[in-house]
Amino acid sequence: MFSLTSDYLTDQGDAEQALRLLSEVGFTHVHWCHEWYSDFVYSDNEIGQIGRWLAAYGLQLNDTHGSEGIQHFWYAPEEEARRAGIELVKNRIDLTARLGGDAVVMHVYPPTQHPELKRFNPWLFDQIRRSLDEVEPYARACNVQIALENLIDFAAIEAKVIQAAQADDNAELLLKLFAAYDPSFLGFCFDSGHAVLGRNRIEQYLPHLERLAVLHLNDNDGRDDLHLPPYDGIVDWTEVAAGVAASPYTKPLSFELSLRHTAFSTPAAFLAHSYARCCRFADQVAAQRRPST
């Protein structure tokens, strides 16, 4: 059983065709990733429609990518934006709980070298904790974990202040946050693509795998966040397989892939290729879990 992100074609609009096609190839679960970078709020009717699509195509919700928000960011310095961002997080928790998932992925960025954003660095940890403290009771009541994802300083990279190899990451920030919260509430989302941007950062995230709740398995060229299928880039999949195999993760392996940066011209061809690569990685994980004789 494998899970694929819902936005492998686009992260907006009607997802029915994308769900049907991934089901036909053999994927059994979905990581709901639509509208992750927006202020979009799902209504009860829209959540119900997603549930009907999942049922129609024999799919199950694995987990959800929470909304980062644009104007409504969940740990924004402006109180109005932060409160609205918290409501977005709760909306994704509602979607996840109603559709049978167990975790919502959220972004917490490292201190940045971006010249216009550096002023936020001193209060970063305390502001994230403030928002987590407000989200925790709601998430627990819904039996949904929050999973924090490994990230690098994308803001400074996009502003061309630094290159990916020079970018700081959030490994230390995550370590501090995980020390402050119980794993039953705060888990880890491991993104294999983010872990090799600029340089191989996998080893420093290995300690966090004891909290592994969500997987974003994907590949890239080490320079751009391409979301390629496994083995189509530079990720050391033997190292990743060993980490996943040693973790407590028992859900279907979950892949965050995109057609956009591949050579495939049709979703069917892309999905067939991706599914074969997912099977190859699953075999590696199984081999690592198999006791030696």
Image (cartoon, rainbow, N blue to C red):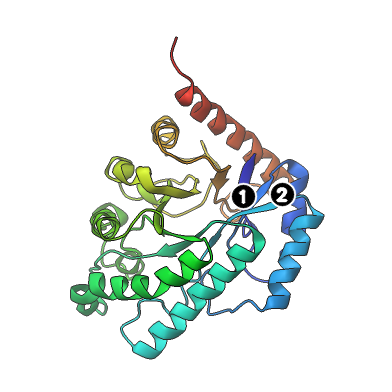
Tell me, for residue 58, which label it has, or none.
none
- Seen in the picture, residue 23 relative to 52 is either above or below; the reply is above
Residue at the farthest right position: 56
The image quarter in which residue 130 lies: bottom left
Q: Residue at x 46, y 84 (%)?
A: 84
- Seen in the picture, residue 194 relative to 123 is either above or below; the reply is above
- Looking at the picture, tell me which residue is in the foreground, 77 or 158: 77
Check disc 1 and report the residue beneath it: 4
Residue at the farthest bottom position: 80
Report helix, strand or loop for mark 2: helix
Q: Quadrant of the C terminus?
A: top left
Q: Amino acid at mark 2?
A: Leu
Q: State left or right for residue 140 relative to residue 2.
A: left
* Mark 2–mark 1 distance (CA, rounded to whole Å): 8 Å
Q: Is residue 181 visible?
A: yes
Report helix, strand or loop for mark 1: strand
Check disc 2 and report the residue beneath it: 22
List x then y, in percent, for residue 214: 48, 51
Q: Residue at x 31, y 71 (%)?
A: 128
- Looking at the picture, tell me which residue is in the foreground, 182 or 275: 182
Q: Residue at x 24, y 73 (%)?
A: 126
The image quarter in which residue 158 lies: bottom left
Mark earlier in primary sequence (2, 1) = 1
Whether the residues at callouts 2 and 1 have beta carbons within 8 Å, the answer is: yes
List x then y, in percent, for residue 54: 74, 57
Q: Tell me if mark 1 has few (under 14), some (14-19) or many (20+) residues whose alpha carbon lies within 10 angstroms of its own.
A: many
Q: State left or right for residue 195 relative to residue 4.
A: left
Q: Tell me if mark 2 has few (under 14), some (14-19) or many (20+) residues whose alpha carbon lies within 10 angstroms of its own.
A: many
